[in-house]
DNA sequence: CTCAGCCATTGGATCGATCAAAACGACCAT
DNA sequence: ATGGTCGTTTTGATCGATCCAATGGCTGAG
């Protein structure tokens, strides 16, 4: 017994024993209040208590009120394991976190929003360490069999991702953060409209007078990378400008600096980058060339990582609304669980351009 | 009577119905395999199957083997809800994620390590959106009552944190990431030895020939901030140097740059900062003074945020071993659950100094 | 050859909730 | 008075695994 002397403030809730001469219920060990205790207190059967909680419209208002009072007074909480044993629904949603790699973006905010929205609907997130491919599917199977997880949230979706099809075949609700970037999309998803982000950057740069706007992206083939490039292209074409200045680099500052140099030589006054890391490469390249980022050449990054605001000049960047993505994903998932057969729903969220010092007016 | 047809070795797993004339077991709906089905197949009672899984030493080797084979062939998984209803242990560990604020460090890696270690021991992490103070305690109560969570992991611990005491009073196992920084510590925790980190930075700088090493920290009063300052102080004293050059700033690049200027004027050749943001302030201040970080003045940051490696010159920084923290925390928690009354255990993990270009030899 | 002693194994009750169906009382029509 | 209907509440069974107490078979001692 840790602490025999508790503060005992106004003590709004009391032990299961009850005070009205009711002998402690048969299984009244621990601190748990069972439905039977509530029923006895309210003078009804356990089934009536169950109805009060799940189908209140069946009860006479007077009885309902009495049961509700008993529930409140005793601080009763339905036991999830017991309920889930009977109903075969756990109100648990599985989410596999990957080992944070270089490419994976930070998921803290996404996870928080996800969890918060789930909580509000009476669901909770069950975390598991995701392996890769087959190992992850095995984990799904385990979670389904042991915990009876009701649904899954996927992230870090890739091209030929097997997970969606696997879940879909078994009729298990799920939602993905990220498109599949494939012809046969399966299931609901939420994603950030990268193209809209780069297009917004182009629009803003054009409004600032820039006419020679380059793009520094990743090698073709990555879904989101190509998407971001496409936004830049469309932005230029919409204004009658030629999308000619384009370079590619892997996610590395040095490589990016080398890759972007030809663009600078060609006279671009602004560069839109597919990531903040690539944008940093632009900073370095401009610096090497004896210029100053933000003055001679405007730069816009992508992701609005913590780096962006710390740089000098501060880096303008396209921010992904991770909180919104989380909320929206959970909304889709809950809707899918409510109506499993409804047509798939896909949501593209617009990112926000965060304007900072690196985005300036065209000088020449 | 149980099983007229037992062997069937090659059958790699089949639907619960079985095909060999065995009428589908009573509750053989869905795709779930129950203990009763396994028992029938193995020709034993359900209790024996239970023993095979939980107390195998009670079974005759031959029986054990037979049961195990049946389990494998049928792909049986014990149903957590049913087990947990009976045993009152959920094998679930609660973790409240806070809304990612500016100060909160990124928890992805910590979470992954935590989850992975928990998985290996048969536990899973149950996420919930943590509110503040009272709201979080209410969430604890709910998780305990409804899900029968076995333990909690805390992070973002603060000075007068009420959570530890609350959990301790109720005898609920928990482990914290972070000390309480208070006289009466409660329970197990894991933390990163910030002092050791800054001391390592000082040692390395001194080895490079630096004699005037300043410290740029946060205003006194924050536990970890004071800790990091202390490491710097001890590092200098250990070498007979005076810890005289010290400045304070809030977590902001501009403010940091202003705060560190006097130190530079006073002639320090190196600065140890309490965070990467503060270190960036040093970069800016050195730049403003017409110098180059890494050449004239060495700088070491703290946390090894993604920024560090991207800067130019790359910022040396003290990296927190978040993966180790997660693993260690789970280890402590599992030990506590196994032996609730054991004396509290506290683990201080040494951070690693990541040497990069900003840490150079003393020029003067 | 019998019986205590010991082991592996079995049968039945149990955890706390929900489901299905029966029981109940009140009310109205016949 | 009898029967039917309706709305409300209760009874009994059930989910799947574990706990407890009891059974069965086997061995070795008397």
Image: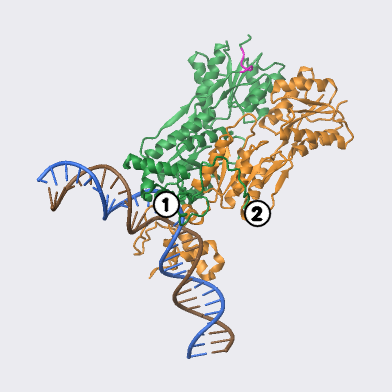
Chain colours: A green, B orange, C blue, D brown
x%, y% of residue B294?
A: 79, 26
Secondary structure beneath dot 1 equals: helix
| Residue found at the very far front of the displayed protein | A21
At 57% from the left edge and 12% from the top edge, which residue is drawn?
A211
Q: Which residue is mark 2?
A: B341
Q: CA distance from mark 1 to mark 2?
A: 33 Å
Residue B261 is left or right of residue A129, and the answer is: right
Q: Quadrant of the C terminus of chain B?
A: top right
Pinpoint residue B30: horizontal percent, then vertical percent. Answer: 38, 52
Asked which secondary structure carries label 2, the reply is loop
Pointer 1 residue: A36
Q: Which numbered dot is residue A189?
A: none
User: Number of labelled discs?
Assistant: 2
Q: Can residue A277 be seen at all in this image of the molecule?
A: no
Q: C1 or A256: nearer the eye?
A: C1
- Label 1 CA crowd tier, 10 Å (few <14, some 14–19, many 20+): some
Residue B211 in sight from this viewpoint: yes
Q: Which residues are magenta?
A: A356-360
Between B2 and A227, the one nearer to me in the picture: B2
The reply to whether dot 1 and dot 2 touch (C-beta < 8 Å) is no
Residue in front for this viewpoint, B351 or C11: C11
Q: Report whether A159 appears left or right of C20.
A: right
Which secondary structure type mostly characterizes the magenta part of the structure? loop
Question: In the rendered view, would you say B293 is above or below A62?
Answer: above
- Give the letter of the chain under mark 1: A
Q: Is residue A250 magenta?
A: no
**Residue at screen point 75% across, 35% down:** B227
Q: Are marks 1 and 2 on the same chain?
A: no
């Amino acid at each position: 017994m840790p602490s025999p002397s508790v503060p005992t403030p106004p003590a709004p809730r009391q032990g299961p024993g009850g005070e009205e001469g009711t002998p402690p219920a048969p299984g009244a060990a621990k601190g748990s209040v069972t439905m039977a205790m509530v029923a006895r207190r309210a003078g009804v059967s356990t089934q009536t208590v169950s109805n009060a909680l799940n189908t209140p419209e069946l009860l006479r208002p007077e009885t309902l009120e009495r049961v509700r009072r008993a529930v409140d007074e005793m601080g009763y909480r339905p036991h999830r394991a017991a309920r889930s044993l009977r109903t075969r629904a756990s109100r648990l949603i599985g989410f596999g976190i990957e080992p944070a790699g270089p490419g994976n973006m930070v998921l803290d905010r996404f996870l928080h929003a996800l969890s918060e929205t789930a909580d509000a609907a009476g669901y909770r997130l069950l975390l598991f360490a995701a392996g890769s491919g087959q190992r992850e599917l095995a984990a799904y199977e385990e979670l389904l069999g042991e915990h009876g997880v009701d649904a899954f949230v996927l992230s870090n979706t890739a091209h030929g991702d097997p997970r969606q099809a696997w879940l879909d075949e078994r009729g298990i609700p799920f939602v993905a953060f990220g498109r599949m970037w494939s012809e046969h999309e399966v299931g609901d998803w939420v994603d950030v409209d990268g193209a809209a982000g780069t297009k917004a950057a182009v629009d803003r740069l054009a409004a600032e007078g820039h006419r020679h706007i380059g793009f520094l992206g990743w090698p073709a083939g990555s879904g989101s990378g190509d998407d971001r490039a496409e936004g830049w292209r469309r932005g230029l074409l919409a204004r009658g400008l030629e999308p000619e200045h384009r370079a590619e680099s892997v996610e590395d500052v040095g490589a990016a600096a080398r890759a972007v140099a030809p663009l600078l030589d060609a006279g671009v006054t602004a560069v839109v980058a597919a990531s903040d890391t690539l944008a940093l490469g632009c900073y370095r390249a401009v610096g090497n060339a004896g210029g100053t980022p933000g003055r001679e050449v405007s730069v816009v990054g992508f992701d609005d990582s913590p780096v962006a605001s710390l740089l000098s000049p501060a880096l303008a960047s396209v921010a992904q609304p991770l909180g919104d993505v989380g909320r929206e994903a959970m909304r889709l998932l809950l809707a899918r669980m409510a109506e499993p057969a409804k047509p798939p729903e896909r949501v593209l969220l617009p990112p926000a351009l965060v304007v900072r010092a690196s985005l300036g007016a065209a000088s020449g």
